[in-house]
Each structure stands twice: as C-alpha cells, then as structure tokens.
Image (tube, rainbow, N blue to C red):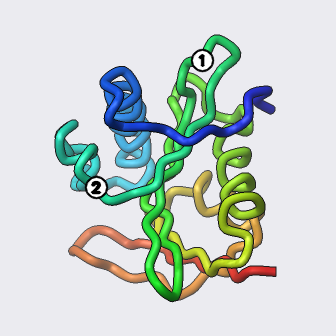
Amino acid sequence: MPSAHPRPLDLTDDSTAYAVHRIGRAAYAVEAELIGFDGIPALRESLADLRARPLNWIGALSGDGEITGFLAWGEEADAVHLDRLCVDPARFRRGIASLLLRHVLTDVLPHRTVTVTTGADNAPAVTLYERSGFTRGADFSPVPGLRMASFTHAPG
C-alpha cells in the first residue's frame, strides 16, 4: 500500500500536467489492450485539452513526490462522475487506485452519489469498483466494438 496520502493536483503547474498526461496515456494504452479497443478518447487528448477539462484532480505521490496515479471527477447537482482513474503502469498492483478511490469516497465526497464507467472487459477496473462498494448497472455500447460497464456508489 502506498505510504503517501492523496493530494489535490494543480494542472496549471507544468510538471504536474505533464506527469498526469504521461501517466494517463500509458494507463489508457494498457486498458485499450485489455478491452480490444484503441479509440479511447483520452489516448488522443492533447495536454491543452486535458488542462481545459473542468475536473477536480487528486493524486497519489511517492515518497520523493513523484505522481504515481491520479483520479479526476466532475460534479453535477445530483451526482459526481469519476472521469478517470489512472495509475502509472510501472506501479500497477500496489494499491494506488484503491487508495485514491477510497480517499475520494470517504474523505472528499462521502455524502454524494458517485458514478463511473469503464470498459466492460477491463477486469482489474471492474473488480476494483465492485470491491469498493459500487453497484454495477447496465452495460452499454457507445460505439460499435466497445462495451462499457456502468457503476454507481451510493452514500452511506
């Protein structure tokens, strides 16, 4: 389990934005392989597009301050949608995604309904959300060849 506590990330800082962009592209490349679909929008997102997204960002940092993973979400009146949860592939299976998700659900958004979608064939992500108390909803196909799984986490 990571020793660092999650911290808000400021994407106006160049080094932070570059690290988030690099980690996101690497993590989504792994997901693309897992689900057999390389059309994930974040794979083609520019750094400027990433920075322009109206999201809240939180990151897990290593002992030396390096970003090892991040979670970003958008807020609406009735719910919160997790937009992305990415971990540097060199640090997979070290509890970083679980740490970030648990922190957001219990410390940042404990009284909000939280939704998320992921590739239905992304077994590590599906398992993470199920173990974290999310309820799986209906799968859907936004484009041919891609099946997405939807999840909801109710407060309390």
Q: Work out whether residue 116 can be spotted.
A: yes
Indicate the amino acid at tag 2.
Answer: Arg
Q: Nearer the viewer, residue 38 or 28?
A: 28
| Percent coordinates x, y for residue 46 in the rendering | 17, 40
The image quadrant where one finds the N terminus is: top right
The image quadrant where one finds the C terminus is: bottom right
Indicate the amino acid at tag 1.
Answer: Gly
Q: Quadrant of residue 152?
A: bottom right
Q: Is residue 141 left or right of residue 81?
A: left
Residue at 52%, 74% in the rendered image:
80
What count of labels does the image hold?
A: 2
Residue at 69%, 74% in the rendered image:
134
| Percent coordinates x, y for residue 145 in the rendering | 26, 69
Q: In this view, does 106 lie above or below 23?
A: below
Residue annotated with mark 2: 53
Residue annotated with mark 1: 65
Q: Nearer the viewer, residue 83 or 8?
A: 8
Residue at 31%, 68% in the rendered image:
146
User: Helix or strand or loop: what does disc 2 sit on?
Assistant: loop
- Disc 2 from disc 1: Cα separation: 24 Å
Q: Is residue 3 above or below residue 147?
A: above
